[in-house]
Amino acid sequence: NAGVTQTPKFQVLKTGQSMTLQCAQDMNHEYMSWYRQDPGMGLRLIHYSVGAGITDQGEVPNGYNVSRSTTEDFPLRLLSAAPSQTSVYFCASRGLAGGQNTQYFGPGTRLTVL
Amino acid sequence: TQLLEQSPQFLSIQEGENLTVYCNSSSVFSSLQWYRQEPGEGPVLLVTVVTGGEVKKLKRLTFQFGDARKDSSLHITAAQPGDTGLYLCAGTYSGAGSYQLTFGKGTKLSVIP
């Protein structure tokens, strides 16, 4: 099991550019989510999904889009990057069946928007 | 949006000392989790508590869930340099989206040899 994988690990963008952060998990988890982590702010939920074809907004969704076409993949899209989106982004997954409460995090993508 | 207060924000102690980190909410948690995060990595789950008054131990780490399920603490006995890291508490609340985690801002712990 690779767990939760994220690519790229580092990315630098110019304001206005677009990009997709990739996330994949091989644990057949229903629930997947994206967080951003900023200094002194903890982790804030951007978007989440409870299964293929189902997505919803978290606490800070503006400027980000997601889709969930398969159970394994949950990409995060920045359509027009802004300096305020400079952050470390974490993807996470967990099972929703009874008794499963462990959320597994990927290694993160460090994004800088100039 | 549920608010989760974590304190202290920073903690620097000498090896061998004891410490306690606190996590508080104005709302009742359905469950509460503690994570540890090392630089350049994602958070890793340490423990989940779900029952009021519950106490769990993980080697030198003791986790306690308040009787009213609105607060939790993490106590480390005889801290070691390997305990250095960011400790995050995260809670779930009952109702819609009960599987969503709300994170505290974290406690950055430095253990000096």
Image (cartoon, rainbow, N blue to C red):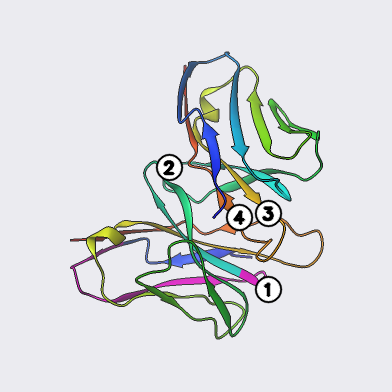
Q: Nearer the viewer, mark 2 or mark 4?
A: 4
Say yes or no: labels 2 and 4 on the same chain: yes
Residue B28 is a magenta residue: no
| Quadrant housing residue A12 | bottom left
Give the chain of mark 3.
B
Disc 1 is attached to a residue of which chain?
A
Q: Classify mark 1: residues with Cα within 10 Å, few (<14), some (14-19) or many (20+).
A: few
The answer to whether the residues at label 2 and label 4 have Cβ atoms under 8 Å apart is no
| Coordinates of residue A59 in the picture (x, y in percent) | 48, 61
User: Which amino acid type corresponds to the residue marked 2 in the rendered image?
Assistant: Pro
Helix, strand or loop status at disc 4: loop
Circles 2, 3 touching at the beta carbon (< 8 Å): no
- Comparing B110 with A48, the one in front is A48
Which range is magenta? A11-31
Q: Are marks 3 and 4 in contact (CB under 8 Å)?
A: no
Residue under numbered circle 1: A28
Against B11, residue B46 (above or below) is below
3D distance between C-alphas at marks 3 and 4: 8 Å
Tell me the residue at 74%/40% (across/down). B69
Q: Return the residue at label 3.
A: B93
Classify mark 2: helix, strand or loop.
loop
**Label 2 to label 4: alpha-carbon separation:** 21 Å
Q: Position of residue B49 (x, y in %)?
A: 75, 43
Q: Quadrant of the C terminus of chain A?
A: bottom left
Query: Which residue was labeled with disc 4?
Result: B101
Q: Is residue B33 above or below residue A96?
A: above
Q: CA distance from mark 1 to mark 3?
A: 24 Å
Q: Give the residue drawn at x 62%, y 17%.
A: B78
Q: Earlier in the sequence, mark 3 or mark 4?
A: 3
Q: Residues within 10 Å of mark 2 (few under 14, many from 20)?
A: few
What residue is shown with label 2?
A: B39
